[in-house]
C-alpha cells in the first residue's frame, strides 16, 4: 500500500512555497466558497422523504367534553388531533391534545365519524387551532376550534367528493394564520446573543429568506446562504468568554483554546443549565415566558400559545454549527473537561457519548491524544471488536466514542418504547432486551458529530440517537439545514429541546406548513428558534476587534489545462457525437435523457484516461439504437440469473458514478433508493413508483414496464474491504495507463519541494487505482485513503501521512495521498499536505471546497495551492462555466425570481446538458 515509512512527530514547519517551473502555465482562478457536504458512507438514508401534504380545507367546529379533561388552551393555540379507536363510547373518537400532551376534549361525534377512516388510512392529516380558550378558570363544556385538513396533492381530486362537506361548513379564511404571530406579540427576542429585535414581517430580507428556504437543497451552497440569513441578526462576536477555561495553565489541556472556542464553551455551559424566566419581565427561554394570571401566574409558550401552570421541562444542549475547521472537536472536549465536577442526576452516569461517522472516529481519538493532558480524561472507542463490553463498563469512562452504525444497530426495535426505567436500562446487556449496551447507559451527555446525518427522522440512526437516554444532548454540524427546514425539525427531535417544537407534528404545523405558503411570521419563528438553539460562526467571521477568528495561510487556485492525446480525442468526439444525437432524439420524442447522462460520465472518464471506458460501452455506442419493444411488461423474476446480475452490476456502477435519477435528476435522491428497470434505466424507487401510477412505460424509452419490472439494489451487502490494486492478484497484469492528466500530475510532483505533501482527489476510484503505477515508476512514495478501509487502517494511513518528512524518510515516506472525493474524507485533518490536485471537476464545487478544507484549516502553516486539472476543449471546460454561473446565482440566491426560480431541477439539468453538449 503506502511506500516506505516515516518517523517523527507531527509538526507543520517548513519553508514557504517557491515558484514552480512548469511548462504549461497554469491560470489563476477564483476561490470556491466554503461549504460542507454530507458524510457519504453512513447517510444513504439521511434525507427524509418529501412531504406530500397540502392544505385542503379549514372549517369551524368545536372541542366538546372539555369539562372532563385537564388540558388548558389559549386562543390561537395549535392543538393536535389524535385518533382514539379504543374509546369505548365511540370507536371513531378523535382526541384534542394540547402542546403539553394533555387532553382538552374531543371533536364532535358527527365530525369524527366522517374523518376517522380517512385519518386511519393516513389519507389526510388534521390539525386544530383554538378559537375559544379555558384559561379563565370557568367551567367550559365546549370551545370553538378551526379544524384544518391536509392531504397529498394526488388525492385532492378524490377527496373533493369525500370531503366536500368541509367546504360548506362555516368556512374560515384559509390557510389559517400561523401561531407564530404570538412570537412578536410577546416581544420575544430569544435567548439570542445580540438581543436585537427580529425583523418585521414586511422586511424584504424576510421575503428573501422565505424564497431561499424554498430553494435550499437545490445546491449545497444555497443551504449555507440560508443559514447566513437565518443567523444574520445574531452578533456572535460579542459573546462572553468563559472565565476559566480548561487549558495549559490548569493542566487539563496541552493546547489553549482560542477565544471563539472559549465563547462556545461559555455558550454551551449556559445551554446545559437553562433557567425558566422567574418573572413576567424576564425574556423567553426556549419560548416560555412567565405571565400574570387572574388566579395565579402561569407559563406561556409564545410559539404555540400554550399556557400551563406546571413548570415546563427545558431541554439541555443545542447545535454547534461552526464552519469547517473552526475546532468544534476541541470546543466539545473543553466542555467535557470544564464540567467534570458538575452535579449530575443520581441516575445518570458521568460519561459523555460521542457518536460520529466511522471516518472521523480516529480524529476524535487523535484530538484527545494531541490536546488533552495526560490523565485528565479517560476514553474508550466502542467500535468493532471492542464492542464486546457491558453498559456498566462503558459508564466508567469520561468519554465513549462510537459510530452512527453502532447506535443504529443497537437501538431497540421500537425506539419510542426505549424509555425504560433507569434500573432496567442499567441491566441491558449486549443482547437480551433488544437494545445494546449503548442503550443501557443513562449518559451525562450525548454528542452527534457531523450531526446533519440525523436529518431523516425515519432513519434507524436518527431514531436510535433520539432514543438514547441522556441529561444533555448536542449536535455538531456545519450544515444543520441541508435539504429543507424539516432537517432542523429532525435535529430538534434528537435534541429534545424547545418542546413541543421537538415533536414532528408541531414542527410541521408551526413551521413547515406556514413556511411552505411563505408566511413571514413562520420565518421569524424559525429565526428565533435558530437563535435559541444554535451557535454558528464561519471562517470569515470576525471577533469584536474586527479580526478573523482564525488566521490561515493564503490559498491560491490554478487551472491547469491538459490536452487529450490524438487517440483519446478521436474516441471522445465519437461519444460526443453519439450523445448529441441521442439528446436531440430525446428532445424530439420527449423521452428521457438518462443515456445521455451515462455518456457524459464516460466523457468525463475519457478526460482522465481512455482506458477507463469499458469496451462494451463503445460497442453499444457503435450499434444502431435498438427499437423500443412493445408488448407486455417484463418481470425481473422472468429474467435469467445472468441478466439479473448484469442489471445489478449496472445499477451499482450508476451509484458509484453518482448518476442521477432519470425522473427527478437528483443524484442525492438517487443514492437513497436506487433501482433499475429491465430495460436498464435507473431511477429513485419513489420516482418510478409515482410515474407508474399514471403510465406503465419507462420514462426513458417508452418500453412497457410495471412494478415487477423494477429491480432494487440488494440491501446490506457488506462493502468489500479495500484492497490495494498493486497488492491484488491482478497486480501483474496492471500496466500504466495512458493519461495526460497523470503525466501532468507527475510533472508537478517531481518539481515540488521535497518537504511538501500533496493530496490528489478524483471522483473515480478506478482512476486513482491507476495513478500508483506511474508514481511507482517515478519513485514517488504515496499512500491511499479509501472509504472502504476499516477504522484502524484509516487511522494508520492518516497518521503515517501526517508525519512530517525528514531527510531520512523523504524518499520512502508518502508525499502523496490519493483520495476519493466520495471517501467520507469529511472531518479529516490532512494539514501535512499543502498542495491539492482536483483531477476532475463536476457540478458540486462545494464537494471540492470541502476537499480543500482538509488542508486549509487550523494547523496549516504553509501557503496552500490548489490545482484543477481541466481537459481542454471538453465537457470539463463547459462544467466550469456552469459552475461559475451557479456561483454567481448563489451569490444572489434570494434574488432568483420569475422564470428562473420556477425552473425545476429537471429543466435546469436539461438546459445544462444542452450547454455541455453544445446542442443549440
Ligand atoms: N485551540 C487550538 N489550537 C491549536 N489547534 C487547534 C485548536 N483547536 C483546534 N485545533 C486544531 O484545528 C484542526 C481543526 O479542528 P476540528 O477538526 O475540530 O475542526 P472542526 O470544526 O470539527 O472541523 P470539521 O467540521 O471539518 O470536522 C484540528 O487539527 C485541531 O487539532
Image: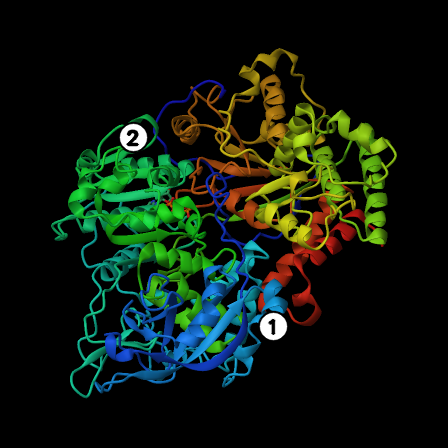
Residue 273 against residue 835 in the figure, above or below: below
Q: Is 387 rendered above or below residue 892?
A: above
Q: Residue furthest front?
A: 89
Q: Is residue 251 visible?
A: no
Mark 2 Cα-neighbour bin, 10 Å: few <14, some 14–19, many ≥20:
some
Q: Position of residue 440 (x, y in %)?
A: 23, 41
Write down the residue under mark 2. Answer: 387
Name which quarter of the figure residue 774 lies in.
top right
**Vertical arrangement, residue 465 with respect to residue 188, above or below:** above
- Ligand 1 under 8 Å from disc 2 Cβ: no
Q: Which residue is mark 1?
A: 161
Q: What is the secondary structure assignment of the residue under circle 1?
A: helix
Q: Give the CA distance from mark 1 to mark 2.
A: 57 Å
Ligand 1 image-quadrant field:
top left
Residue 682 location (% of width, % of height) = 67, 41
First-in-chain label (1 vs 2): 1
- Rendered residue at 60%/35% (across/down): 656
**In the rendering, at what x and y percent does residue 113 appear?**
44, 71
Asked if residue 446 lies left or right of residue 452, the reply is left
* Residue 60 falls in image quadrant: bottom left
Amino acid at each position: 500500500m503506502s511506500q516506505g515509512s516515516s518517523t517523527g512527530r507531527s509538526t507543520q514547519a517548513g519553508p514557504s512555497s517557491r515558484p514552480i517551473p512548469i511548462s504549461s502555465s497554469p491560470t489563476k482562478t477564483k476561490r470556491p466558497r466554503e461549504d460542507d457536504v454530507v458524510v457519504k458512507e453512513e447517510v444513504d438514508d439521511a434525507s427524509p422523504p418529501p412531504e406530500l401534504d397540502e392544505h385542503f380545507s379549514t372549517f369551524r367546529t368545536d372541542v366538546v367534553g372539555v369539562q372532563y379533561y385537564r388540558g388548558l388552551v389559549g386562543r390561537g393555540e395549535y392543538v393536535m388531533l389524535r385518533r382514539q379507536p379504543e374509546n369505548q363510547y365511540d370507536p371513531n373518537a378523535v382526541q384534542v391534545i394540547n402542546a403539553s400532551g394533555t387532553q382538552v376534549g374531543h371533536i364532535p361525534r358527527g365530525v369524527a365519524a366522517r374523518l376517522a377512516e380517512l385519518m386511519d388510512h393516513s389519507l389526510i392529516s388534521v390539525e386544530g387551532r383554538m378559537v375559544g380558550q379555558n384559561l379563565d378558570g370557568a367551567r367550559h363544556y365546549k370551545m370553538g376550534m378551526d379544524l384544518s385538513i391536509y392531504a397529498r396533492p394526488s388525492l385532492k381530486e378524490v377527496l373533493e367528493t369525500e370531503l366536500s362537506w368541509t367546504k360548506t361548513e362555516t368556512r374560515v379564511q384559509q390557510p389559517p394564520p400561523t401561531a407564530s404571530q404570538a412570537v412578536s406579540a410577546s416581544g420575544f427576542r430569544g435567548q439570542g446573543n445580540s438581543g436585537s429585535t427580529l425583523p418585521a414581517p414586511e422586511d424584504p430580507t424576510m421575503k428573501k429568506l422565505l424564497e431561499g428556504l424554498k430553494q435550499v437543497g437545490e445546491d449545497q451552497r444555497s443551504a449555507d446562504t440560508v443559514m447566513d440569513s437565518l443567523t444574520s441578526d445574531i452578533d456572535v462576536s460579542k459573546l462572553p468568554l468563559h472565565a476559566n477555561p480548561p487549558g495549559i495553565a490548569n493542566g487539563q489541556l496541552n493546547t489553549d483554546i482560542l477565544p471563539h472556542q472559549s465563547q462556545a464553551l461559555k455558550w454551551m455551559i449556559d445551554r446545559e443549565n437553562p433557567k425558566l424566566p422567574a418573572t413576567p419581565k424576564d425574556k423567553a427561554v426556549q419560548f416560555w415566558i412567565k405571565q400574570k394570571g387572574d388566579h395565579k401566574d402561569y407559563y406561556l409558550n409564545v410559539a404555540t400559545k400554550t399556557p400551563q401552570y406546571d413548570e415546563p421541562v427545558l431541554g439541555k444542549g443545542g447545535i454547534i454549527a461552526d464552519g469547517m475547521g473552526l475546532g468544534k472537536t476541541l470546543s466539545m472536549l473543553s466542555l467535557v473537561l470544564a464540567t467534570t465536577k458538575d452535579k449530575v442526576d443520581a441516575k445518570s452516569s458521568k460519561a459523555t457519548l460521542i457518536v460520529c461517522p466511522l471516518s472521523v472516529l480516529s480524529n476524535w481519538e487523535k484530538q484527545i491524544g494531541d490536546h488533552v493532558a495526560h490523565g485528565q480524561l479517560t476514553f474508550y472507542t466502542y467500535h468493532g471488536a471492542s464492542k464486546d463490553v457491558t453498559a456498566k463498563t462503558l459508564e466508567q469512562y469520561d468519554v465513549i466514542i462510537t459510530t452512527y452504525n453502532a447506535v443504529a444497530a443497537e437501538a431497540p426495535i421500537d425506539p419510542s418504547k426505549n424509555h425504560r426505567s433507569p434500573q432496567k436500562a442499567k441491566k441491558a446487556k449486549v443482547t437480551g432486551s433488544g437494545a445494546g449496551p449503548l442503550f443501557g447507559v443513562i449518559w451525562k451527555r450525548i454528542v452527534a458529530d457531523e450531526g446533519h446525518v440525523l436529518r431523516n427522522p425515519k432513519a434507524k440512526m436518527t431514531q436510535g440517537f433520539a432514543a438514547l437516554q441522556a441529561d444533555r444532548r448536542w449536535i455538531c454540524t456545519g450544515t444543520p439545514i441541508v435539504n429543507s427546514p424539516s432537517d432542523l425539525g429532525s435535529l430538534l427531535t434528537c435534541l429534545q429541546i424547545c418542546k413541543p417544537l421537538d415533536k414532528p407534528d408541531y414542527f410541521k404545523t408551526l413551521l413547515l406548513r406556514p413556511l411552505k405558503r411563505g408566511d413571514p411570521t413562520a420565518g421569524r419563528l424559525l429565526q428565533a428558534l435558530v437563535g435559541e438553539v444554535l451557535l454558528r460562526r464561519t471562517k470569515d467571521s470576525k471577533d469584536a476587534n474586527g479580526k478573523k477568528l482564525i488566521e490561515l495561510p493564503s490559498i491560491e487556485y490554478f487551472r491547469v489545462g491538459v490536452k487529450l492525446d490524438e487517440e483519446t480525442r478521436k474516441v471522445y468526439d465519437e461519444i460526443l457525437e453519439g450523445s448529441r444525437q441521442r439528446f436531440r432524439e430525446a428532445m424530439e420524442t420527449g423521452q428521457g435523457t438518462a443515456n445521455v447522462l451515462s455518456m457524459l460520465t464516460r466523457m468525463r472518464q475519457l478526460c482522465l484516461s481512455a482506458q477507463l471506458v469499458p469496451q462494451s460501452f463503445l460497442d453499444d455506442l457503435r450499434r444502431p439504437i435498438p427499437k423500443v419493444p412493445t408488448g407486455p411488461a417484463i418481470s425481473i423474476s422472468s429474467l435469467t440469473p445472468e441478466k439479473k446480475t448484469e442489471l445489478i452490476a449496472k445499477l451499482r456502477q450508476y451509484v458509484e458514478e453518482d448518476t442521477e435519477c432519470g425522473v427527478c435528476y437528483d443524484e442525492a435522491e438517487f443514492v437513497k433508493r436506487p433501482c433499475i428497470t429491465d430495460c436498464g434505466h435507473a431511477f429513485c424507487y419513489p420516482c418510478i413508483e409515482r410515474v407508474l401510477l399514471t403510465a406503465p412505460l419507462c420514462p426513458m424509452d417508452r418500453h412497457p414496464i410495471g412494478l415487477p419490472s423494477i429491480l432494487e439494489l440488494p440491501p446490506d451487502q457488506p462493502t468489500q474491504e479495500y484492497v490495494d490494486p498493486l497488492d491484488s492478484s491482478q497486480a501483474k497484469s496492471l500496466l500504466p495507463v495512458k493519461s495526460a492528466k497523470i503525466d501532468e500530475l507527475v510533472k508537478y510532483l517531481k518539481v515540488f519541494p521535497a518537504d511538501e505533501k500533496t493530496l490528489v482527489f478524483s471522483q473515480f476510484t478506478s482512476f486513482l487505482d491507476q495513478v500508483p503505477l506511474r508514481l511507482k515508476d517515478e519513485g514517488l512514495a504515496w499512500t491511499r485513503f479509501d472509504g472502504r478501509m476499516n477504522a484502524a487502517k484509516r487511522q494508520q494511513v492518516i497518521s503515517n501521512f501526517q508525519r512530517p518528512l525528514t531527510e531520512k524518510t523523504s524518499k520512502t515516506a508518502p508525499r502523496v495521498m490519493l483520495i476519493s472525493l466520495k471517501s467520507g474524507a469529511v472531518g479529516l485533518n490532512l494539514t501535512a499536505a499543502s498542495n491539492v490536485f482536483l483531477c476532475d471537476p463536476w457540478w458540486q464545487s462545494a464537494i471540492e471546497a470541502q476537499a480543500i478544507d482538509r488542508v486549509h484549516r487550523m494547523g496549516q502553516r504553509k501557503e496552500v495551492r490548489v490545482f484543477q486539472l481541466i481537459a481542454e476543449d471538453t465537457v470539463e471546460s463547459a462544467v466550469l462555466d456552469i459552475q461559475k454561473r451557479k456561483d454567481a446565482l448563489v451569490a444572489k440566491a434570494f434574488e432568483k425570481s420569475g422564470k428562473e426560480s420556477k425552473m425545476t431541477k429537471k429543466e435546469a439539468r436539461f438546459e445544462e446538458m444542452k450547454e455541455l453538449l453544445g446542442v443549440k
